[in-house]
Image (cartoon, helix red, strand yellow):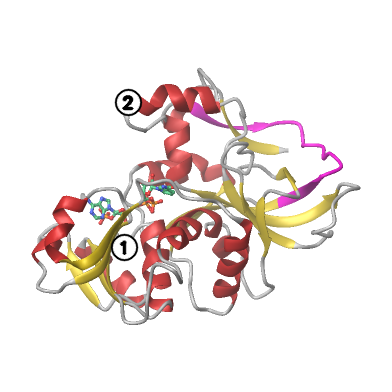
Amino acid sequence: MKAIVQYKYGDTNTLYLKDVVKPKIKNNEILIEVYAANVSSGDMRINTLDVPFILKPLLRLVFGIKGPRRKVRGISGSGKVIEIGSEVTKYTIGDRVNYINSMGAGCLAEFVALKESSVMAKIADNVTYTDAAPISFGAMTAYHFMNESTIEKGSNVVIYGASGSVGSYALQLAKHFNASVTAVSSKKNHEAIKAIGADILIDYKTEDFSESKEKYDIVFDAVGKISKKQSMKILKENGKFLSVKSLTKELTSRMVILNELLSEGKIVTLMDKIYSLEEFKEAHKHVYGLHKVGNVVIEVKK
Ligand SMILES: NC(=O)c1ccc[n+]([C@@H]2O[C@H](COP(=O)([O-])OP(=O)(O)OC[C@H]3O[C@@H](n4cnc5c(N)ncnc54)[C@H](OP(=O)(O)O)[C@@H]3O)[C@@H](O)[C@H]2O)c1
């Protein structure tokens, strides 16, 4: 099968399109024919080791010392179940699924074998594979911060970095939970984020969000660029500063909820560009540039 492989950490020149052996499943695994592979900031961080200096040795220990232990890259995506192991009960052949496999990767290939217990859920028939592919990464992260327990009806929320994958889903989730949202992004992206529900727009290149006259219940830094200290002035007395720099959980139960919201049209996937497998370098360059608008996906099978 065709796959994107990497032997040493580094920029997009360390990625190759190769023919590799198609995975074989164990009794507790399913074989997925990949339709869409999500290319995310998470892929960028692991593939390039772009993390704070102090974390680099830890990442090498976890993912591989000189290069990733799992040569076939890609940590999230969507596809169709084409084979199931003898112990599998939750999925059947023909199911459409999306998933994240942060530790094991292997999703940027024509086929991926995943344990039935992986962070994975079924996709409704009215949702495309490309729209479903980024849910397990961007929407999952956003939901960790913007959910029914963090947001109350009428909450006033700032989403800082609303044009990224996490930010664009966070904005929509906050709106879904009936918050009023001030979205911070560069002006070129205002139209796109207005279209997904932003109430007030701030251009981070020309305005200082912390000078806002409004008071907020939550400031969510969706791009890891601001501090709690900067936000204090505009937070209400019991207001909270949340940041993507903190740890999040990947949960199948959250995938199920997010897939439902996607199917019902309550959230959409803001798509910057869809690439073909042959365009894998351009796709990764786009993501590594850190200025994508929403999501970038590689369509492995049409
Ligand atoms: N904690 C976790 O578990 C977790 C999980 C996922 C992601 N993350 C982290 O969350 C961050 C965001 O991830 P992502 O996938 O959403 O990133 P992304 O999609 O690559 O973010 C790109 C967007 O960020 C905007 N941006 C860049 N610099 C900005 C700034 N100074 N102010 C405002 N907006 C800015 C860009 O807009 P412009 O072009 O206008 O600059 C662009 O639209 C990353 O640092 C990632 O590592 C953490």
Closest to the observer, 233 or 268:
233
Number of other residues with Cα within 10 Å of mark 2, as a class: few under 14, some 14 to 19, many 20 or more:
few
Looking at the picture, which amino acid does disc 1 mark?
Ala
* Residue 98 lies within the magenta run: no
Q: Which residue is mark 1?
A: 162
Q: Is residue 61 above or below residue 193?
A: above
Q: How many marks?
A: 2
The residue sitting at the front extreme is 238
Q: Which residue is mark 2?
A: 53
Q: Name which quarter of the figure residue 89 lies in.
A: bottom right
Magenta region, residue range: 14-33
x 10%, y 60%: residue: 206
Tell me: is circle 1 under 8 Å from ligand 1: yes
Mark in the foreground, 1 or 2: 2
Closest to the observer, 153 or 108:
153
- Residue 231 in picture, x, y percent from top left: 17, 58
Residue 196 lies left or right of residue 278; in this view the side is left
Number of other residues with Cα within 10 Å of mark 1, as a class: few under 14, some 14 to 19, many 20 or more:
many
x 72%, y 62%: residue: 96
- Residue 290 in picture, x, y percent from top left: 33, 46
- Residue 264 in picture, x, y percent from top left: 57, 79
Secondary structure under tag 2 reads helix
Secondary structure under tag 1 reads loop
Q: Is residue 278 above or below residue 128?
A: above
